[in-house]
Image (tube, helix red, strand yellow):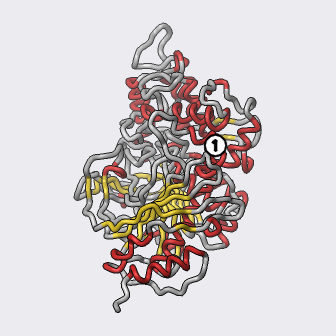
Amino acid sequence: MKLTFASLLLPVLALALSGCGTTSPRLAAGADLQAGCKSFEGYTIDAERIVWPGLASGKARIESAAWKPATPLSTDGRGPTPEYTIRPATPAHCQVIGSIAPVDPKADPIRFQVNLPANWNGRSLQYGGGGFNGTLVDGLGLLPAQRFDSASPLAKGYVTVGTDSGHSSRPGESPMRFALNDEMLANFAHAAYPKVRNVSLELMKAAYGRAPSKFYFFGSSEGGREGLMMAQRYPQAFNGIFSRVPVINWTGLQFAGVRNGMSLMNEGWIAPAQVNLVQERTLAACDAADGLADGVVSDPVGCLKRFDPASLRCAPGAAGTDCLSEAQIKAVQTLRSPYRFPYALANGFSEYPGWSIGGEAAPPAGPGGGWLAWWSGRAAPSLPPTPDNGIAWIFGSGALQHFFARDPNADPRQITPERVATRVAEVSALMDATSPDLSTFQRLGGKLIILEYMSDYAQSPFAGAQYLRAVQQRLGPRQPDEFMRLYTAPGVDHMGGGAPARVDFLDALAEWTETGRRLLPDEVVEQRSSPPFAIIRSRPLCEWPFWPKYLGGDVNDARSFVCSF
């Protein structure tokens, strides 16, 4: 009798998921995987195979398993950014969806999706989330910063993994309401991601007869924070981690966001026309300082010293959109200044850096844009917030209410570090990805790449530099060079728009992790977001604190620039 994947899968699952060992060989791809995919449905994985030291968990249950045929590339226009609009071609695969039961019956389960390709390359890649999560990441899209014309991880043969981090957003409820439950908050902070990693491990062992050779984690923004948390808290979990625009000092960002929003209230609000004015004057002062007037401030640190917003002060008795009032100048200065706590947060951090410069008037659609999307908005910050407010105010005020005061009706303007000091310490210990001790991750051969966008107004790009300094101080100034890289891309907003920002790090990170060879990319590109994804321009990919300086030649070619300091 011919043995199919389905006939082999049942005993393999029974052994693997019950905790017994298995010697099952890697099973054939293609039709056998297709035939056996449905057999995953209904299986459970014991909590003992999910948890990590110090973590509790319920069982995992597979809710659905379906064979998905190959699909072509799609640019259907859905979604706010190119990453979501473009659906890369996917190969035939077994799509497994399930959940991990909570310990607290009042908590939501952790939902997950694992995609098992017919042609597995022996590796796994887990996607990070975004914002406050609450939706299931399907692991089918492009990676953060990935070029539009490159294959998705699933198409490259990776098992791909995603999760909602342990709570589901519901219409009519705050996306931060989950933080009122201790288990859901801990899952969001760090616990959900290694649990889902272990579930995916059991599924891979059952499907292919062996564990993956390497685990990778790619995340952006909140997902970038998650990746750093894995390197810091669970250094055995992932071999290679890519973290784009990570929310590193999460606690600092929320308090700074509320402070920045409060600076815009009353007479401080900056209208869209004045945002345009600030960008125009910023470019006039700084654009050509890098050797090329191209609409990109390549040296933001130098520009912060060169351009003073006070130069836009209205003449006495004057007002209008062609100048700024004293209150508005103060608001800009507040945005660009550090937020200092009266005591140390977790890992000794007591300051959140001020924001960068350039890209102030970037289109707010995405959201990925500049001040209109994240800070000033189309109306002054209000209570309760409205969709016309900047996202930093909406997120920050909600975070102070739900995470720190644990009162959705509290006035965020009255929630100060002094008044909620005990809770700040608790949340910082849970949420902040600031531990500089990466020694175990380094010893295990882990590799970490951070990419910051220098016109990011969702979070300060200088937080990446602040964290790198902390790691250097902890491990020694040269040690991070062996396993860690911090790159920056000038003129780019939070979601990767405004200047060259697209680069394929997956193959490079895998090569570095698996062979030790640092064949890392040396340029970023800007592409059209529709086929054939023509490259508009490219720039060098510079490590912090270097930035691309124009030397002459084709202004759209990275070879015409050099990383300078």
Residue 485 rendering spot, x and y as whole percentages: 55, 61
Residue 375 rendering spot, x and y as whole percentages: 49, 32
Asked whether 288 or 231 is in front, the reply is 231
Asked whether 478 or 222 is in front, the reply is 222
Residue 542 rendering spot, x and y as whole percentages: 48, 57
Q: Residue 89 vs residue 464: left or right? A: left
View extreme (left): residue: 532
Q: Identify the residue at horizontal 50%, vertical 43% (top origin).
A: 300
Q: Residue 365 vs residue 176: left or right? A: left
Can residue 248 be seen from the camera position used here? Answer: yes
Asked whether 79 or 106 is in front, the reply is 106
Is residue 20 shown above or below 366?
Answer: below
View extreme (bottom): residue: 1
Is residue 451 shown above or below 157?
Answer: above
Q: Identify the residue at horizontal 31%, vertical 54% (top origin).
A: 86
Number of disc labels: 1
- Which residue was labeled with disc 1? 181
Is residue 361 shown above or below 152?
Answer: above
Can residue 560 be seen from the camera position used here? Answer: no
Q: Residue 481 vs residue 3: left or right? A: right
Q: Identify the residue at horizontal 40%, vertical 43% (top origin).
A: 296
For numbered disc 1, what is the local secondary structure?
loop
Residue 298 rendering spot, x and y as whole percentages: 45, 47
